[in-house]
Amino acid sequence: MKNLINTLKNIWKIDDLRVRILNTLGFILIYRLGSYVVLPGVNSEVLSDANSASANEGIVGLINIFAGGAFSRASIFGLGIMPYISASIVVQLLGMALPYFRKMQMEGESGRKKINQITRFLTVIITVFQCPGYIATQITNKAGVVSDPSMFWWVQSVLILVTGTMFVMWLGEKITDKGIGNGISIIIMIGIIARLPFAFVSEFGSRVSGDGGGLIMLLIEMVLLMLIVVGSIMLVQGTRRIPVQFAKKIVGNKQFGGVRQWIPLKVNAAGVMPIIFAQAIMFIPLTLVGFSQSASMQNFLAPLSNHYGFVYNFIFALLIIVFTYFYTAITVNPNQMAEDMKRNGGFVPGIQPGKKTAEFIDQIMSRITFPGSLFLALIAILPAFAIKLNIQQEFAQFYGGTSLLILVGVVLDTLQQIESHLLNRHYDGLMKTGRIKGRTSASMTAA
């Protein structure tokens, strides 16, 4: 406890770090307050009653998690940061498919600014197309929510939602520039973690009342949750280090190079993207069931409608494994890594530079991606096991899936940045026993 107090004092002593943390908290407060501001003309009480049964199901529940509940409340931040995430994914995929975008990605800071600008424009376009669908399916289709859905109200609501999304995107960029951590990730994390107190209170109430098992069962749940969090941290931080030796050069009386560094290959290089892609695919059968009038098709696809059933989770896990390999293959380029290493005079001991090095790195990635994909799939379906143990649905979502992985990754990144500020000013880090290794920490980075 004394070490924790000393660490907090050290953090407060650093002016730049103190200002960044306060800025981050201020921006987060603005975001949370805005998520409770309802669109003009919307009866929030009627909407809340209408959404009480379906706000946490299907794709609506997924989007509502990332938006911190603003989606189901018809807030001015109703679409949250999701359009920006969609635009970022599209631009990233274009960078792998089109030479023009690939060239911009390799132009350094100037290329990054161009890509950011394109992402912003694409965010506006995506939001404009999503707003009418959001209003039609989540607001106006419920009786009594909007008293006068005139054309003026529609245009007004679309403009407000687009502006709200752009403002949330601006808040994320400001957190990155003036605060601590990655702004977009922190906004998503805050939306997820905002549900935790309510979920815990609901779970506590269910355990202490009736035949819930009492405080003993609640304690067992907490221990299991802690073990799952530890496993998720191992998955996020796990790396396979490849040694790289650099050639020794002597210029005058000075020696350059001749040192050994490491290429850290991540066990889960794909992050949470395989889960997001798999969830998007799994929503397709549900959409077909909703639009189909065929009783045979509805019966055939019925098992896929049960998110906690065996068939759904088995197919879901298989898709995650496939998408993990797919996304790792398009994000990690062994040929580029080998070429950069060769250009800088580096080589893997015992491996011929160039093509042989690329093949060696690709072989290592294939080996470590398999256990990583299995563990990722296991974490993704853990909420289904939690439901089988009679854990409340709201609280079960924190036992795995996208929510848990995002929370773990963002917290590690933020703590790593705080520790870097402390160490740069000759203070002890956050932990006495070792350094915090976030997703971006590496002894050597290779593009």
Image: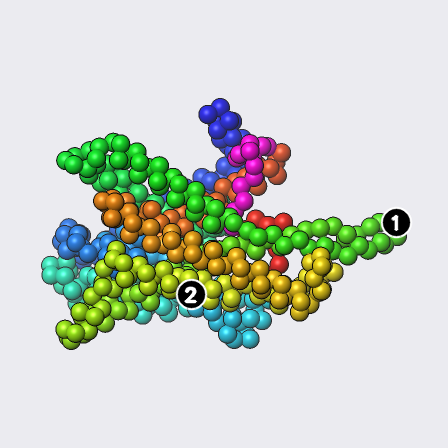
Span of residues in magenta:
427-439
**Residue 27 seen in the current view:** no
The kind of residue on which mark 2 rests is: Val
Residue 58, position as x, y percentages in the image: 25, 60
Direction from residue 350 to residue 299 in the image, left or right: left
Q: Who's the residue at 28% across and 52% down the image?
A: 384
**Label 2, on which residue?**
322
Q: Nearer the viewer, residue 162 or 205?
A: 205
Q: Quadrant of residue 105?
A: bottom right
Quadrant of the snapshot with the C terminus:
bottom right
Residue 350, position as x, y percentages in the image: 71, 59
**Label 1, on which residue?**
253
Q: Who's the residue at 21% across and 70% down the image?
A: 300
The kind of residue on which mark 1 rests is: Asn
Q: Nearer the viewer, residue 421 or 320?
A: 320
Q: Is residue 119 above or below residue 190?
A: below
Magenta portion: prevailing SS class: loop
Query: Badge 2 local density, few (<14 within 10 Å), some, or many (20+)?
Result: some
**Of all residues shown, which one is farthest toward the right?**
252
Q: Quadrant of residue 129?
A: bottom left
Query: Is 438 inside the magenta-drawn segment?
Result: yes
